Image (cartoon, coloured by chain):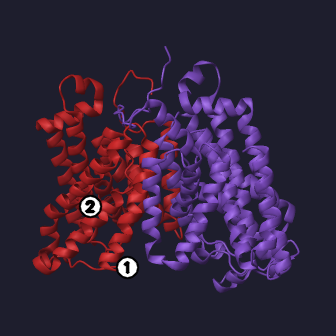
Chain colours: A purple, B red
Amino acid sequence: MAPAGLAVSAVLLLVVAPLVLSPFRLDLLAKYLCYAIVAVGIALAWGRGGMLTLGQGVFFGLGGYAMGMHLKLAEAGPGKLPDFMSWSGVESLPLLWKPFANPVFTLVMVVLLPVVVAVLLGSLVFRQRVRGAYFAVLSQALAAAFVILLVGQQGLTGGTNGLTNIQHFFGLDLYDDADRRLLYLIVALVLGLAYLGVRQLAASRYGQLLVAIRDGEDRVRFLGYDPALVKTVAFAVSAALAGVAGALFVPVVGLLTPANLGVVASLELLIGVAIGGRYSLAGAVGGALLFNYAKTVFSEELPDSWLYVQGALFVVVMVWAPRGIAGLAGQLRDRWARRGPLRPVSYPAGADRPQEVST
Amino acid sequence: MGALNQLVIGASIGAVLLLAALGLTFTFGQMGVINMAHGEFIMAGAYTAYVLQPLAGGQAVLAALPVAFVVAGLLGLVLERVLIRRFYGRPLDTLLLTFGVSLILQQLARDIFGAPNVQVRAPGWLTGGVDLGGLRIPYNRIFILVLAVGCVVGISWYLARLKQGRRMRAVMQNRQLAAVSGVATERVDQLTFFVGSGLAGLAGVALTLIGPVGPTLGSAYIVDAFLVVVAGGLGQLRGAVIAAFTLGVLNSFVEFWTANGASFAKVVVFAVVIGFLQVRPQGMFVLRSRALS
């Protein structure tokens, strides 16, 4: 995005939105912005790195549960148990929960937990050159297993209900409109930082290497680089962003349930990026906002048809606009240059798309 | 005794996994297509049995087997002809595309059959079970196991003996070479998709024997089925069989050994698959090839 566009977006998000929107709509926007933070990470891992991650919900959840645990403990007060534990008959605070009473530890964990899981999975998987569809399937299986684990550990995680009834966030009263506006501004600022940081990263030498690996991993390996390392770093950064987004999501929405981070939720995080344009950071952010806004509108007006719309969006974007809205202009230009309809070429299936070799 | 019991339960989970994964291993293996709508083809098979119930009564399950195969197969064929055909060479995009299709099919099922689950009555001769020295094996579990074995035998016969099957193997092993040797690869792709999706229909009928039928029936199995394919190796019948039963048995034993086990079983299965991929990154069996990737 050009500096002018960036400035306009910043003014819109930081000044205009809080002034114009009702508290209810501002809350919704804050929620969309959380998803947009995840989208920035997905655009890095998927758009630049070619790693289709269907498990971003896991990292979102790790960050979210870390924050949620701290907030529930703060809510209950020292020496007391969070409400859901007494409902499920837990009598003393589980060991896992104890360190989360400390706010600094919690903030570190919000980033560290997702990064550790991502580095572990990434280094195990990428080092063995497991990639493409295999990686996508594995990341999805991780999301499925994570949700089942959360639901099963009722006394530790609140089970299906998750962590609910969160009323304070580091001294902010979440039932107070002014405090909520402050929370919104925090989310917007984090999104801005995430966007600028990832943009810087993508423009760097490292970012170029990442794109090169996406387009020809073996060639990059022959040049002496370690693709596994480069991909793991990008995956970890995207996981960290998802973790931070999850941690902000908890106070914004006031609860976190396993349904917010399962297989379907993870795919919903992805479709926004696909709609906006996976190769463009700004496109990914815009797509996430647009998709979640559409979801709200449809859930309010026509709840039954939302799944049709969502499904059709996947199909339409993938068939006609694989580069998303941000890539439409470029796609039209390509089509014009070719003078004629884009014909699907039958590539050998199973293999990656053959790399074009200029002669 | 407990262990033996878990083994039986595991084998029966494995049989269901195998039925769900059989079709996938060919569509994924031959065409590189990740068909997330496979789960909804399973659901379509299950609803076929439900629809046939008023006609066939107690024998709906038997009557549904061939019908569900054709129904799900045709769904797959339409999907291939209309959409997936444009996506060869873009495996990651087919994943998102077919996920969209699966959402639409789920809602369609909800609109046609209603959101609540429905029940398919099992035939009378499938109630009860055999007693093996204190170990009770329900007939419906045996039926599923027999069905899975039958499918594996049928497919290996198809692949080994029929010329369509041989062409399918040729395309799977080397698409370009098959094409220049005169195999009509597009036709083979269509047939593969029909058979692969049809197998999902059979899996759906089998699932009506062990639980109610609902719009999200298939999506519950799809992730595990993909794990089976990844662990077994693409397009590998042997691999799929071994992986399905191993993961099924592993699942049932972890549930048995750990308190509150159901929630840990999936995590353990996932960790085992990741660990296994450290030894064999491309799954149990691999097509030998000199190609780099």
Q: Position of residue A35 (x, y in %)?
A: 66, 61
Q: Chain of mark 2?
A: B
Say which quarter of the image contains residue B215.
Answer: bottom left
Q: Position of residue B200 (x, y in %)?
A: 27, 57
Q: Is residue B217 above or below residue B16?
A: below
A306 to the left or right of A193: left
SS under mark 2: helix
Q: Position of residue A299 (x, y in %)?
A: 53, 75
Image quadrant holding the C terminus of chain B, namely top left
Q: Can residue A304 be seen?
A: yes
Residue picked out by circle 2:
B203
Residue furthest to the top in view is: A359
Q: Position of residue B190 (x, y in %)?
A: 23, 44
Q: Is residue A340 above or below residue A34?
A: above
Taking the spot 51% from the left edge, 40% from the top edge, the residue there is: A331
Which comes sooner in the sequence, label 1 or label 2?
1
Give the distance between the C-alpha atoms of the residues marked 1 and 2, in whole angstroms: 21 Å
Taking the spot 65% from the left edge, 55% from the top edge, the residue there is: A286
> Crowdedness of circle 2 by 10 Å Cα count: few (<14), some, many (20+)?
many
Say which quarter of the image contains residue B290.
Answer: top left
> Crowdedness of circle 1 by 10 Å Cα count: few (<14), some, many (20+)?
some
Q: Which mark is residue B115?
A: 1
Residue nearest the viewer, comparing B21 with A191: A191
Taking the spot 76% from the left edge, 66% from the top edge, the residue there is: A67
Residue nearest the viewer, comparing B132 with B188: B188
Please state which amino acid type lies under the numbered disc 1: Ala
Q: Chain of mark 1?
A: B
SS under mark 1: loop
